Amino acid sequence: MPNKQQTKAVPSSIGLIILGIIFIAANLRTPLTSVGPLVSLIRDNVHISNTLAGLITTVPLLAFALLSPLVPKLGRRYGVERIILIALIFLTIGIVIRSLSGAANLYIGTAILGFAIAVCNVLLPSIIKRDFPNKIGSMTGVYSISMSLCGAIASGMSVPLAVNAGLKWQGALGIWGILSFVSILCWLPQLRNQKKQTATTSQQMAGNDVNVWRSPLAWQVTLFMGIQSMVFYVLIAWLPEILKQQGIDSNQSGWYLSIMQLALLPFTFIVPVIAGRMSNQRLLVVITTILLLTGTLGLLYGSSDMILLWIIILGIGGGFAFSLSMMFFGLRTENAHQAAELSGMAQSIGYLLAAVGPALIGYLHDVTNSWNLPLFILLGASVLLLLFGIGAARNRFVGSRNSYELPRKGQ
């Protein structure tokens, strides 16, 4: 059972914590989704190849994969609040550096903001587990929808800001530094309780450590997170091209990609709330798989007149999958430290798959000159999501005996 003595937010500070979580979440996708529509402008201005332009998206994902396992230890040693504040400062610095002229600044700034986002990605679920142990579903929904909504807005505003407003690509990317700076101001009040919370947390964690890398349940959560990340980023990278092969022009395929992202928004809030009220989440995992299979099969064999329907179904399925992966960090752990460790492990593997997935799918398309095999790969990924999701949805904890200990001789 979860530790009933977990630290909870002081009532007078709950509003400030929620505000801080919302603003931090708003920064987790905007620096990334604002890049895609501007890639051609950046490439032509900086004079880089398509391969190097693709690295602008890949570098942050690799930063997530490299740093995520280390973040829980930093949070435990120096305090979660302090580490998040430092990450927000570096995020702002990274955004500013990326917006300066020159290819070197572009990649240095991108790497810095990638590491900063990795820290916040890992520690936010632990903050929610610690301060809102009885409202994990609703709080996960709040930060998920903030992240997804702001990410979609950033994607849609990039070209208008760069071209119509005359900010060029540098200004269109740099303007999001204002949002990260405001987030710093919103998070500063949390440092007042840093010392007290760190001491309390250390007492709670004593004798309650687990090695999540040895937990079968943690690996199921991790692979669920990884596969859903890969599917999402593959669709973000290649859906417009997949639709072009079916006779849809570039402008319309771009709008379809936006519609897919908008379709998942309501479910990033609804699904966590529902999941938090269920004894296990297996039904939601099954629904997720059915949605992803239906949408992908629709792209493969469905009528071109129903493309919009398949896109919306894929978006809803992606919303289910992402929300469940975020929920598992809190539901499958007994305390905030375990939540951070599981989050770090899952996001490390998850974003590594997310970084490799689009390149692999692109390679398969180049080899076969068709999108059929890549779509079959997505079908297989959806089935694997079901298999790992059923295990991750069990009402167990990574630190409990029946899920943590590996089989011993004679067992």
Image (cartoon, rainbow, N blue to C red):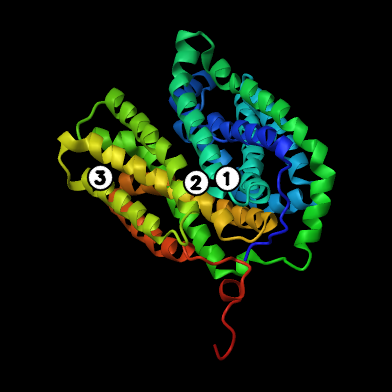
Front-most of residues 366 and 239: 239
In this picture, is 209 found above or below 85? below
The residue that label 1 is drawn on is 62
Front-most of residues 1 and 198: 1
In this picture, is 252 found above or below 260? above
CA neighbours of label 3 inside 10 A, class few (<14), some (14 to 19), many (20+): few
The residue that label 3 is drawn on is 370
Residue type at mark 2: give it.
Answer: Ala
Q: CA distance from mark 2 to mark 3?
A: 21 Å
Residue drawn at x 78%, y 46% is: 79
- The answer to whether one can see residue 285 in this image is yes
Q: Position of residue 168 (x, y in %)?
A: 52, 13
The residue that label 2 is drawn on is 355
Front-most of residues 34 and 225: 225
Query: Which label was assigned to residue 262?
Result: none
Question: Of helix, strand and loop, which one carries label 1?
Answer: helix
How many marks overall?
3
Question: Of helix, strand and loop, which one carries label 3?
Answer: loop
Q: CA distance from mark 3 to mark 1?
A: 28 Å
Looking at the image, is mark 3 or mark 1 earlier in the sequence? 1
Q: Position of residue 138 (x, y in %)?
A: 53, 43
Q: Nearer the viewer, mark 3 or mark 1?
A: 1
Q: CA distance from mark 2 to mark 1?
A: 7 Å
Q: Position of residue 114 (x, y in %)?
A: 61, 38
Q: Position of residue 239 (x, y in %)?
A: 33, 37
